[in-house]
Amino acid sequence: MNTVPNEGGVLGPAAREASIARLRATSEPGNELDILIVGGGIVGAGAALDAVTRGLSVGIVEASDWAAGTSSRSSKLIHGGLRYLEMLDFGLVKEALHERGLILSVLAPHLARPVPFLYPLTKPFLERPYVGAGIALYDAMSITGGHSRGVPFHKHLTRRGTLRAAPSLKKDAFVGSIRYYDGQVDDAKYVANLVRTGVHYGAHAVNQMAVVDFLREGERVVGAKVVNHEDGSQFNIKAKQVINATGVWTDETQAMVTERGQLKVRASKGIHLVVPRDRFQSTVGLILRTEKSVLFVIPWAGTGSLARRTPTGISTRPTLRPPARTSTTSWSTSTGS
Ligand SMILES: Cc1cc2nc3c(=O)[nH]c(=O)nc-3n(C[C@H](O)[C@H](O)[C@H](O)COP(=O)(O)OP(=O)(O)OC[C@H]3O[C@@H](n4cnc5c(N)ncnc54)[C@H](O)[C@@H]3O)c2cc1C
């Protein structure tokens, strides 16, 4: 099936109808897609763009809206993972820092920016050289040939310098700090941009369209049955390969094909609290150790700070369209799915 580029990657109603017509036509003999991707989060959108720019014919369907799942509920950080360095996972950190530099300086400088974090030091002597060496290594590992690191280098701060950067900190709670940088991105816009770029190169992208079953020939999956949430209609999409990119819903998607799913995805949740900026005066974010994990305080959207605890495992999965929840006070909370 030939791909027909959509100049500019428009995602309006007319483009959606045109994509549906193309996907319906895949049932005609010899007209199947090379690849059908199920799920329009960062993984599905990235896979669609990768595949279509390799010259493959690609369809991507999303049950709700683009990035409606975990990919719009993250902590919006593009980080190399300072704490993975402490776990000695050098390969992972190196790769993540490389991608961080690419996003910040080449791929999406319009959506991403460097964000400063303080690592407060609480002990007078040994902590500074230990943490300082780790952060220096973190900075050094982000140096790659070919493109910019995208963020400034770290700096050691005295107690006074720390207070200047974050006046709301309790004076006697730390002896100094180290300021380092990571990246911040608008995660939902980033996914939407990836989908649009994929569509620009010829991918057929349809949101509000859920896979409800898979088509099989013997043991092989040869497509999917979808329902169009806009009008309730159902039809089949045929494809040589189907990619399951349904994130935390992977188990449910696999269960449509076989009882013995090959991948087990453990759901985890994190908690974000949005705090008005005037309640916590700081020009920087913070990374803090808690008894069991790490707490981030992240400057967010010019209006507030996002406080986030590291994700923990949960035994239930979110509904496909989680309702928005807002508390009655000036705090709003969101649970990362
Ligand atoms: C609290 C928290 C904070 C995080 N913070 C960060 C961070 O700061 N930086 C970072 O890089 N990562 C972060 N992550 C991780 C990151 O958010 C996830 O790894 C990523 O969003 C997963 O993307 P995905 O595409 O796999 O899943 P999702 O974004 O969940 O996409 C799956 C999509 O599949 C769709 N779908 C499901 N079933 C069907 C069906 N039957 N038919 C069609 N579509 C279907 C869903 O609607 C959904 O849109 C965080 C994660 C959590 C939990």
Image (cartoon, rainbow, N blue to C red):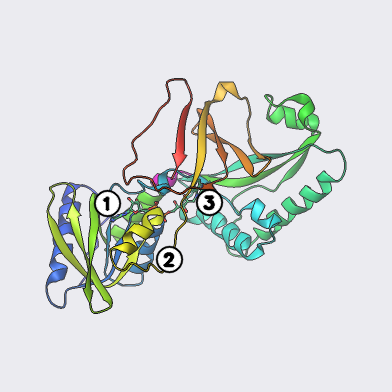
Distance from the alpha carbon under mark 1 to that under mark 3 = 30 Å
Cα separation between marks 2 and 3: 32 Å
Label 2 packing within 10 angstroms: few (<14), some (14-19), many (20+)? few
**In the rendered structure, which amino acid carries the disc numbered 1?**
Ala
Residue at 13% over, 49% down: 232
Q: Against 149, is 271 above or below?
A: above
Numbered circle sitting on residue 106: none
Which secondary structure, mark 2?
loop
Mark in front: 1 vs 2: 2
Kind of residue indicated by mark 2: Leu
Query: Which of pointers 1 and 3 indicates the residue nearer the eye?
Result: 1
Residue extent of the magenta highlight:
185-189
Residue carrying label 3: 104
Q: Earlier in the sequence, mark 2 or mark 3?
A: 3
Q: Ligand 1 closer than 8 Å to the CB at disc 1?
A: yes
- Could you tell me which quadrant the C terminus lies in? top left
Q: State the SS at label 3.
A: helix
Q: Which residue is mark 1?
A: 63
Quick one: 109 or 41, which is closer to the camera?
A: 41
Residue occupying the point 73% across, 25% down: 170
Residue 102: horizontal and vertical position, in percent? 53, 57
Mark 2 lies on residue: 263
Q: Amino acid at mark 3?
A: Leu
From the viewer's perspective, is the residue at label 2 or at label 3 nearer? 2
How busy is the neighbourhood of tag 1: few (under 14 within 10 Å), some, or many (20 plus)?
many
> Of helix, strand and loop, which one carries label 1?
loop
